Image (spheres, rainbow, N blue to C red):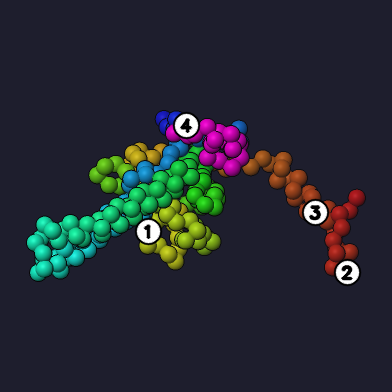
Amino acid sequence: MRNATKTDRLHPEDLVAMPEPGLPEKLPEDERILWQGRPEVWALTCEALNLRWVIGYFVLVWLWWAGTLTDQIPFAAALLAAAPLLGIGAVTALLLLALGWAQARATMYTITDKRVVMRIGAALTMTLNLPFTRIVNANLARRRTGVGTLAFELQGHNKFSYLVCWPHVRPWHFRTPQPALRCIADAENVARIFTEAAEARVHAPCIERRESRDAAMEARASVSDTGDGATVAAE
């Protein structure tokens, strides 16, 4: 499998603060990073923060307000009179872009050959460790630009909070939140890397040493009942 690690996107403070970029601790010797990346700022702002809808709303309100003034002043003058709404809309759009940049800047997604690690949170940083053995299914939503979201359906009941993990979750799945690599570039290639690594991990043979199993059985056999509910190991 091609190693697609992207450390060129990291900043110097990331390298100082963490033993491994984007990871809470140093990886074990038998684990390696296959891919790392962050959300695309523009895509995250448009998709998660609905930037286009906000801009469209202010444009419509601006035109509506100008239309209500046309019975008093010419249409061109009415457009100028309602222009302050566009200024408010521009400030709002800039604030959303700043929020999207902060979210993307504070995020680092990592795929290793054993798990998916998500370091997320602009205000409160948290790390999600998703072993491949807990991931039941992965859903890819890709746009024509190649940017997409890879969401993970987890096994059993999970305690992830939709609001705490937002926007790094699959949209509209409130009851059973699905952690997601949100708005990543070249999403199809990232999905392929994940699929190949997950299949190799899940279908890897599990080898149990006979000596360890026999030793465990002998240890259980050496425990005797004292009769008062307590157990002691016989010397």
Q: Amino acid at mark 4?
A: Thr
Please name which of the two marks, 3 or 4, marks the residue nearer to the observer: 4
**Residue 178 visible:** yes
Which of disc 1 and disc 2 is earlier in sequence?
1
Magenta segment: 9-27
The structure residue drawn at horizontal position 8% and vertical position 61%, both measured from the top left corner, is: 74
Q: Nearer the viewer, residue 112 or 166?
A: 166
Which of disc 2 and disc 3 is earlier in sequence?
3
Report x, y in % for residue 121: 50, 50
Q: Quadrant of residue 71?
A: bottom left
Q: Residues within 10 Å of mark 2 (few under 14, many from 20)?
A: few
The label shown at residue 7 is: 4
Asked if the residue at tag 4 contacts the one at tag 1, i.e. Cβ–Cβ closer than 8 Å, the answer is no
Q: Amino acid at mark 1?
A: Pro
Distance, label 1 to label 4, CA atoms, is 28 Å
The label shown at residue 228 is: 2
Mark 3 — residue?
Answer: 221
Distance, label 2 to label 4, CA atoms, is 61 Å
Q: In this figure, what is the number of numbered marks?
A: 4
